[in-house]
Image: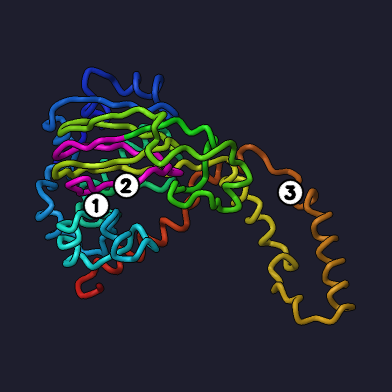
Amino acid sequence: MKIINGNILDDVLNEMSSDEFLNEYWPNSFLHNKGSLERFFSVPGIESISSLENILKIYKNPVMVVGDAIIEETGGILNKFLVPPEEAMSWYEKGAALEFDFTEIFIPELRESINKLKSLLGLPEGTMAKAVLYAAKESAGFSAHFDAYCNFIFQLKGKKKWKLAENFNTVNPLQHYELIEAPHLPDPLKSYWNGEFPDENLSNGRELILDTGSFLFLPRGCWHSTSSSEETIALNFTFGQPAWLDLILIELRNRLIQKDEWRELVNIDLLDENERKKIEEKLKSMINNLPNDFRGISVGDILARKKDDLDVYQSTQLVVRQLMSIKDGF
């Protein structure tokens, strides 16, 4: 097993130190860094990813298939769905891109690399971190979208075209959004959305070509799309971007959960008018008392929440994926 002696960025960045990256690019500016494929082999686990056939032999989880082939199959209702791993190759041959989520379950050495990088970036202990593999060919790829997390991308095979565009619509987005959903916006995202949607081709964006051995840091919120004209394989190290909001909400809930009245069942719809008014008056009193409940919260209390699980959804997905990876579990 390979051991990371220095830090992962010093090992993989070409003619750039990790200090330069952290000072000039992290966390808000993209970086496209070219070099040889061999530099990536210093990262434990990457040498295990040699071909799509090899990936399909070791990956025993549902695979996300994405793109025009799915749009055609579903009559435009969906652009992606999960399939059993044994069906993934047939979708790939139809032109779908493949996404292998939580790859580190099947290549455990990647977990060491992910954790080393998370520590180097100074991210909270409870930050979601995972590896995702992508395979595509013949114009397959992902349509324009932005993510609520950041990605460190290792282009392991082939040449992939990226379009990147600055996000003038949101600052520090807290959720993933696909341009194909426009003009619909989820209510939380709508509350801090600005301006018009970009066009689906991101025509005001910048085109990048990632060939074998290229590295890309993609910050949270950057509009992007991808396409391939040949067989490509890329590995992403994906990290959540915990906000101060996440920490304070955990602390607030932890304090309110100690109060009997805040743990009561929401049971109001079947009550008569008088009983409903009593409940509403009680709730009003509870709301008015919130300043007292939250009095005394310190910076230390908030910072202590860095160790809490800061992405329950992804943690749940990991557990489900781990269960499905057990023999005969899928």
- Quadrant, the C terminus: bottom left
Q: Is residue 146 magenta?
A: yes
The image quarter containing residue 115 is: top left
The front one of 125 and 246 is 246
Q: Earlier in the sequence, mark 1 or mark 2?
A: 1
Does residue 10 lie above or below 145 as drawn?
A: above
Q: Earlier in the sequence, mark 3 or mark 1?
A: 1
Question: What SS does tag 2 mark?
Answer: loop
Disc nearest the viewer among 3 and 1:
1
The front one of 253 and 167 is 167
To which residue does mark 1 refer?
97
The CA distance from mark 3 to mark 1 is 48 Å
Q: Is residue 241 magenta?
A: no
Does residue 315 lie above or below 170 as drawn?
A: below
The front one of 172 and 195 is 195
The residue under the point 37% across, 36% down is 119
Image: magenta residue range: 134-162
The front one of 122 and 24 is 24
> Hey, what amino acid is under mark 2?
Phe
Q: Is residue 189 visible?
A: yes
To which residue does mark 3 refer?
294
Crowdedness near tag 1: few (<14), some (14–19) or many (≥20) residues, C-alpha within 10 Å: many
- Quadrant, the N terminus: top left
Mark 1 touches mark 2? (CB < 8 Å): yes
Q: Is residue 117 left or right of residue 108?
A: right
| Residue 242 position within the rendered picture, expressed as x and y whole percent measured from the top left | 50, 42
| Residue 314 position within the rendered picture, expressed as x and y whole percent measured from the top left | 41, 56
Q: Which mark is residue 142?
A: 2
